[in-house]
Image (cartoon, helix red, strand yellow):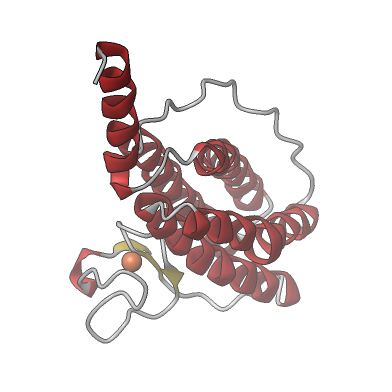
Amino acid sequence: MKLIQLFAFLAALLALTVEGHAAPGKTIANLNKAYRGESNAGYRYEQFAKKAESEGYAQVAKLFRAAAKAEGIHRDSHKAAIIRMGGKPDEFALDDVKVGATKENLAAAIKGETYERDVMYPEFLKAAKEDQASPAIRTFTYALAAETEHAKLYQEALNTLGNNHVTSIYVCPVCGYTVTALPDRRCPVCATAKEKFIVFE
Ligand SMILES: [Fe+2]
Ligand SMILES: [Fe+2]
């Protein structure tokens, strides 16, 4: 075998051994889109939390803060997956946030979460499975489960705005799963012990 052929062979072998499959360019691009989306969502929810606080909606502010924490967990988990798969996390400035009244902010949040739940993450997950990209499959699965809960919690908050049931909110530190009642023992999505959940009182 000529030297150049040997190099080509080794390069192909290396590409195949990164997470056990061919280089998944599409999945890395999707991870970067999700990384950016989660970065912006977390930032947006922090602003929405301040607005809810100023309007006297303490429970809604708590929900925005808990969800912001979860989006931060997804942001970091997507970033780690990009690096593990041999990609490079994009650099970007956060988008300006359009802060409205809390009612509008909740509606905007529901729209974003619904898109992620019904369109974005299912598509990204399908592509990651085709790429057999296990770090991406894991982090997209985590995010999809959490965004589904966020959409539900935001909808409930909007339905009862002004009369929101006061409750603690719990966030799984590994997958961002967000709930108003702790699981019996472990996170139903990633099996983290319930004692490790982050509590928003
Ligand atoms: Fe979310
Ligand atoms: Fe979890």
User: Which residue appears at 49% of the width and 69% of the height?
Assistant: 145
Q: Position of residue 133 (x, y in %)?
A: 40, 51
Observer able to see residue 62? no
Quadrant position of residue 176: bottom left
The reply, left or right, for residue 122 in relation to residue 79 is right
| Frontmost residue, 85 versus 150 | 85
Quadrant position of residue 171: bottom left
Observer able to see residue 140? yes
* Count of residue discs: 0
Quadrant position of residue 186: bottom left
| Frontmost residue, 197 versus 132 | 132
The reply, left or right, for residue 120 in relation to residue 185 is right
The reply, left or right, for residue 116 in relation to residue 187 is right
Residue extending farthest to the top is 3
| Frontmost residue, 1 versus 177 | 1
User: Which residue appears at 30% of the width and 57% of the height?
Assistant: 174
Q: Position of residue 159 (x, y in %)?
A: 74, 76
User: Which residue appears at 44% of the width and 73% of the height?
Assistant: 179
Q: Position of residue 18 (x, y in %)?
A: 30, 39
Residue extending farthest to the front is 1
The reply, left or right, for residue 51 in relation to residue 128 is right
Q: Position of residue 47 (x, y in %)?
A: 61, 40
The quarter of the image holding the N terminus is top left
Determine whether 10 is above or below 177 in the image.
above
